[in-house]
Amino acid sequence: MPVDSNTLFVQVLHCLAVLAAFIAPALLILIPIRFLTKLPSFIFRKLLHIVAFTCVTLMILSSRSWQAAALTSVMLAIVIYPILSAFEDASWFGKLFVQKSAGEIKKSLLLLFFMFAAMIAVSWGFFGKPHLAAAAILMWGTGDAAAALVGIPHGKHKVRSRFTDGRKSWEGSLAMLAVSFISGMIVLSNAQKMPLPRAVLSAGLGALLGSATELFSPGEYDTVTVPAVIAAVLLLLR
């Protein structure tokens, strides 16, 4: 249904308020932890990822239109990129955001928020399924975080295949599968009120194929391949 400009403006403000209500207290906790403790960099990085994916999921579930949710994601990408560019040479920037390479954080966030917008536009705008967009995003983000949080310190059994980079482990992949499945079940069975058998099938197959895609995708491409596969599975089983 078309949304007039005044209504859309109010809805975007609502989306931004939801994001701010979640992100602000999270950062007030995480930033002191980063600078005052010896928390490993990869853990802090994945905690930031969990905050980003969770707050976007909540924004989708509370938004009144797909246009507002998608536009908010695009606006954040456009606003955040130049801000990060302005501060990326500061001494505190690399320590706070744990960059893998120069410019990696701003490029990753740009791609991330545009991917959010694309998933919202397709799942909600085209198919009319807002909860599937929310489920796919949460499954993708929490699963990816679990893969790193388990795989980096405890991944003793590397996946040996010419189709992988040799750094990913079975432990990390299984952690992603489990956490992604649980996240999908939470959204599908509670927010969408999907019958339990269907929720188990959808979340299970989405988590399985999403984890397999993450395992075989080069690191620079999994931001696109993993959410696309999970969303496709959920939409096919809708």
Image (spheres, grey):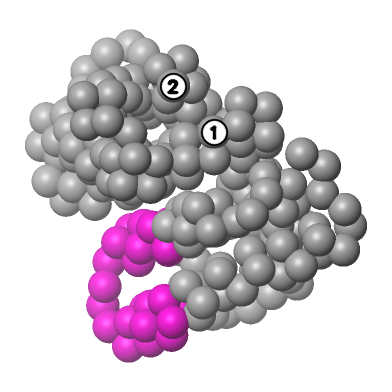
Q: Position of residue 56 (x, y in %)?
A: 52, 56
The three-letter code of the residue at mark 1 reads: Lys
Query: In this picture, which residue range is highlighted in magenta?
Result: 25-52
The three-letter code of the residue at mark 2 reads: Arg
Rendering quarter of residue 169: top left
Residue 129, label in figure: 1
Q: Position of residue 146 (x, y in %)?
A: 26, 47
Residue 192 in sight here = yes
- Nearer to me, 27 or 104: 27
Instruction: Tell whether label 2 touches label 1 (CB within 8 Å).
Output: yes
Residue 137 in sight here = no
Residue 90, label in figure: none
Q: Which residue bears the numbered disc 2?
A: 238
- Nearer to me, 192 or 185: 192
Rendering quarter of residue 197: top left
Quadrant including the C terminus: top left
